[in-house]
Image (cartoon, rainbow, N blue to C red):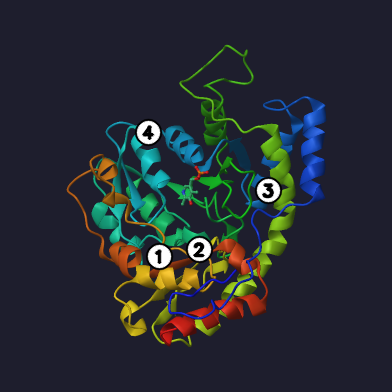
Amino acid sequence: MTRLALHGGQPTRLKPFPQWPVFDTDEETEILKVLRSGRWTIGSEKIAEFENAFAAFQQARYGVACSSGSSALLISLKALNVGPGDEVIVPSYTFLATATSVIDSGAKPVFADIDPDTYTVDVRRLEGLITDRTKCVIPVHLGGCPADMDALNNLARRNGLSVLEDAAQAHGAEWRGRRVGAIGDIGAFSFYASKNMTAGEGGFITTNDAELADVARSISNVGRDLKAGWYEHVRYGWNFRMTAFQAAILLSQLRRLPQHMKRREDSARYLDSQLSKIDGVKPLRRPEEVTRHAYHLYIFRINPESFGLDNKEEFVKALKAEGIPCSSGYRPVYSYPFISSRAAGEPVHNINTERAAYHEAVWLPQYVLLAGKEDLDDVVAAIEKIREGG
Ligand SMILES: *Cc1c(COP(=O)(O)O)cnc(C)c1O
């Protein structure tokens, strides 16, 4: 079989990158234990064990497992009492669920722009978006890079807002030595198939606030109070529970995470140094306060013109044809009409978000960073080849 690169000739790379998800006999053993126990959902000690282990890993006092990152966001908003009449500030460069969770809580999203060098929310511009309806802000630790949590907590304190961390891409990430998820009031994680640890699906809520944790647990379990009877529902809730099979897989995924994190950080530093040498390529800035970066994505910025290309889609197409898994990433969340029609205020155009989405951002998925140095050299060589016109 021959495959041609876009500019002709052999692609730089024909070998596949490491496959994701990674698993071994540890997952097999854990999942069989659950199967044979006959306790497959709530009440299984596996779920409690995983809740304790993951909350401790994120340095949070409390943890509640749930069905997805999207439901973790929605449960968190409801636990924070966000609802109709409220506004919630979210970055416009994020996954759709950051905004849909706000809409489904009954509140309205307000779209903040990102910092052009880190792609996390630009806290300096948040003050101007706060109204007397603003109840909460959702920083997204995009690609595994924590947002400026000092500035966010400060702003929230001064304006009486709550902070919900969207940590769906940031397992194990740290801001000045503190793990994300409970630096703000509450945090939401995802264990979807693409995420840095996964059970196919799954989510998690972290907090240091005992009452928020209790309410979140209750909302995720059809509004029950576990101290009362099974049919003693005490509030409005839904079934957002995680199964014991997911908890079992996640326990072994968590054991493997630290070694994966180290590998990704080493790879990212290597790519940073190599890609900065190429004209027209600029890796994102990693703030000093980020003592651990989860690198769910490795994001770099390109100037298509300096590659002799009309736009970044051509670059992404060419890089894929060279055998490098990559994507062009998000569109601005407000570019979807069914989102913008449900947002607060006038339509917005956030310039840094639009530049990232339409002109400069290129994403490599996290599993590329699990590869070896020679494999990363293929990434660099492919980009250099596109630069030279194939
Ligand atoms: C994946 C993701 C979510 C949603 O998680 P699901 O488990 O897919 O529902 C939310 N926010 C961000 C930033 C994500 O990357």
Q: Earlier in the sequence, mark 4 or mark 1?
A: 4
Q: Which residue is mark 4?
A: 105
Q: Which dot marks residue 56?
A: 3
Secondary element under disc 4, as helix, strand or loop, is: helix
Q: Is residue 259 left or right of residue 271?
A: right
Q: Earlier in the sequence, mark 2 or mark 4?
A: 4
Q: Earlier in the sequence, mark 1 or mark 2?
A: 1
Q: Which of the two residues, 204 or 177, is positioned nearer the viewer here?
A: 204
Q: Which residue is mark 1?
A: 119
CA gap between label 4 and label 3 equals 28 Å
The residue that appears at 27% across and 52% down in the rendered structure is 335
Where residue 49 appears, x then y in whole percent? 74, 38
Name the image quarter holding the C terminus.
bottom left
Disc 1 marks which amino acid? Tyr
CA gap between label 2 and label 4 equals 26 Å
Q: Which of the two residues, 1 or 19, is positioned nearer the viewer here?
A: 1
